[in-house]
């Protein structure tokens, strides 16, 4: 099923021509209308007409999140505020928030790309779409809303939180599709079963889009098993448009990027050098058609790679691998780089534990210590000490094999790791407080 067959299956050569034409336009518009970009261009002596091929994009300076904060709130807008019809914003928990402005055309575009995502996983107007991402300044709720509206599905705008109600709505309305963070999906399944006595796999859910945080293939299997649905990766970010930049198709083999609107590059996170297709690095995105807020070479800090080869679904737009973490989630411990992703993978390969964990890093003396707290299942928890001790050792060994780092595993009681209605907090770095 295609929402927009023509562009979704456009031959790559024609797509590249379209991208180049749009790149030239967006560069010109950004240079002429946004002093922030003009200054950056002038600093490196670049003029819009210097961009003659797609490869020339490498001469355009990157845009970082820190720079966007400096021009808070509207310094990146390319149209007068009267043309902006909606504003979203990042949470700003780690500094000033980043503000995103949308024109009417941008909202139209957002609906279009999200409609493609949903259609790609066989969501139609017959579906009942429950959106459990937060509505409001966060882009998750309204992004899915615009896409579902476009395809004419029945929308249940539940927003985040109110877990009991979410499950009652699913049961009473016969929800067939769920959108939320993967950690919240797990919590919903657990809550349904244990607090309300509803077996989640008996609900009518057939598919779900999960994103806004890192999750592994093992976590996907877990969510699919509990709800009896197909779980898909969705990708997006406030700075670019919100959810809808990329989404998996029914092959579940990477996320198709809507390349007619978003130009992607993978760069070395340290040097900024553009890496060849297939190499893992930091995703950099240029918006080709955004009116209100053109974004040139935005450093997403998300780690992924471009997947080589064609997808069996018939779409020609390229795919990226699932997000492996963020450059700022990278934990440097005793000189070794470590991603929470690797730890999640290792934990979920071991039987008898729950998919809830937290990584605590301390520096008691001069050496970093990592403690991984892992929840055990109710059945395991009532086992003998010896069984638990064996499980603990097994986890430590598995994590060491995956990461090359020796960690201390602590088994904790069922339900003792805090549950989240949004993004889960996986890493607690106590070194920052003691340094
Ligand atoms: Zn595909």
Image: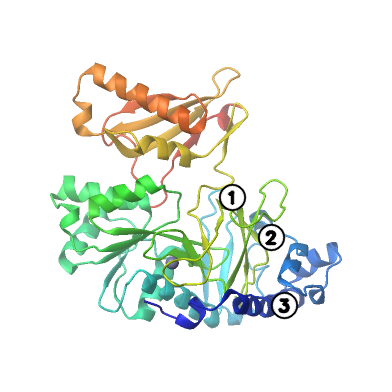
Which quadrant is the C terminus positioned in?
Answer: top right
Q: Mark 2 vs mark 3: give the one in front.
A: 3
**Closer to the observer: label 2 or label 1?**
1
Image coordinates of residue 410 in percent, x first then y, are 37, 25
Q: Quadrant of residue 393?
A: top left
Decide if residue 420 is in sight here: no
Q: CA distance from mark 1 to mark 3?
A: 28 Å
Q: 224 or 89, which is in the foreground?
A: 224
To which residue does mark 2 refer? Answer: 63
- How crowded pointer 3 is (Cα within 10 Å; few <14, some 14-19, many 20+) is rated as some
Q: Quadrant of residue 142 in the image?
A: bottom left
**In this figure, which residue is indicated by the disc labeled 1?**
280
Image location of residue 391, percent across then percent down: 31, 24
Residue 239 in sight from this viewpoint: yes
- Which class describes the residues within 10 Å of circle 2: few (<14), some (14-19), or many (20+)? many
Crowding near the residue tagged with mark 1, few <14, some 14–19, many ≥20 C-alpha atoms within 10 Å: many
- Location of residue 332 in the rendering, given as x and y in whole percent from the top left corner: 59, 33
Q: Secondary structure at mark 2?
A: loop
Front-lying residue, 432 or 187: 187
Asked if residue 416 lies left or right of residue 137, the reply is: left
- SS at mark 3 in the image: helix
Q: Nearer the viewer, residue 279 or 160?
A: 279
Q: Residue at x 57, y 57 (%)?
A: 97
Residue in the picture at 52% in, 82% down = 104
For marks 2 and 1, the one nearer the N-term is 2
Q: On the image, numbered disc 3 is attached to which residue?
A: 24
Q: Residue furthest right?
A: 45
Q: CA distance from mark 2 to mark 3?
A: 17 Å
Q: Nearer the viewer, residue 199 or 393?
A: 393
Give percent across and percent down for residue 114.
43, 72
Q: Quadrant of residue 147?
A: bottom left
Q: How is the image coloured?
A: rainbow
């Amino acid at each position: 099923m295609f929402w927009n067959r023509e562009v979704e299956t456009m031959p790559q050569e024609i797509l590249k021509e379209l991208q180049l034409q749009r790149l030239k336009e967006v560069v010109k518009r950004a240079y002429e209308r946004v002093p922030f970009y003009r200054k950056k261009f002038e600093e490196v002596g670049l003029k819009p007409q210097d961009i003659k091929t797609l490869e020339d994009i490498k001469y355009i300076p990157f845009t970082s999140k820190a720079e966007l904060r400096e021009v808070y709130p509207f310094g990146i807008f390319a149209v007068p505020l009267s043309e902006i019809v909606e504003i979203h914003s990042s949470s700003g928990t780690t500094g000033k928030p980043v503000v995103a402005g949308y024109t009417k055309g941008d909202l139209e575009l957002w609906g279009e790309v999200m409609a493609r995502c949903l259609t790609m996983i066989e969501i139609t107007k017959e579906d009942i779409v429950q959106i459990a991402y937060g509505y409001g300044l966060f882009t998750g709720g309204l992004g899915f809303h615009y896409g579902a509206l476009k395809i004419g599905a029945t929308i249940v705008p539940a927003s985040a939180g109110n877990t009991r109600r979410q499950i009652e709505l699913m049961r009473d309305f016969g929800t067939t599709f769920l959108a939320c963070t993967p950690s919240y999906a797990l919590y919903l399944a657990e809550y349904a079963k244990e607090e309300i006595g509803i077996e989640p796999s008996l609900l009518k859910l057939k598919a779900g889009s999960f994103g806004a945080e890192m999750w592994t293939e093992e976590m996907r299997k877990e969510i699919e098993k509990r709800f009896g649905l197909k779980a898909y990766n969705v990708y997006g970010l406030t700075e670019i448009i919100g959810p809808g930049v990329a989404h998996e198709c029914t092959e579940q083999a990477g996320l198709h990027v809507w390349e007619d609107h978003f130009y992607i590059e993978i760069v070395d996170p340290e040097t900024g050098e553009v890496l060849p297709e297939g190499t893992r690095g930091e995703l950099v995105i240029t918006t080709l058609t955004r009116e209100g807020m053109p974004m040139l070479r935005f450093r997403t800090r998300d780690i992924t790679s471009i997947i080589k080869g064609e997808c069996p679904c018939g779409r020609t737009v390229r795919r990226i691998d699932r997000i492996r973490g963020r450059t700022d989630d990278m934990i440097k411990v005793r000189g070794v780089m470590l991603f929470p992703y690797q730890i999640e993978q290792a934990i979920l390969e071991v039987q008898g534990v729950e998919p809830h964990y937290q990584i605590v890093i301390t520096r008691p003396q001069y050496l970093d210590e990592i403690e991984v707290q892992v929840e055990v299942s109710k059945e395991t928890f009532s086992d003998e000490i010896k069984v638990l001790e064996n499980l603990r050792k097994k986890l430590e060994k598995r994590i060491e094999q995956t990461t090359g780092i020796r960690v201390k595993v602590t088994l904790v009681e069922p339900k003792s790791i805090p549950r989240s209605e949004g993004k889960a907090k996986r890493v607690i770095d106590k070194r920052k407080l003691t340094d």
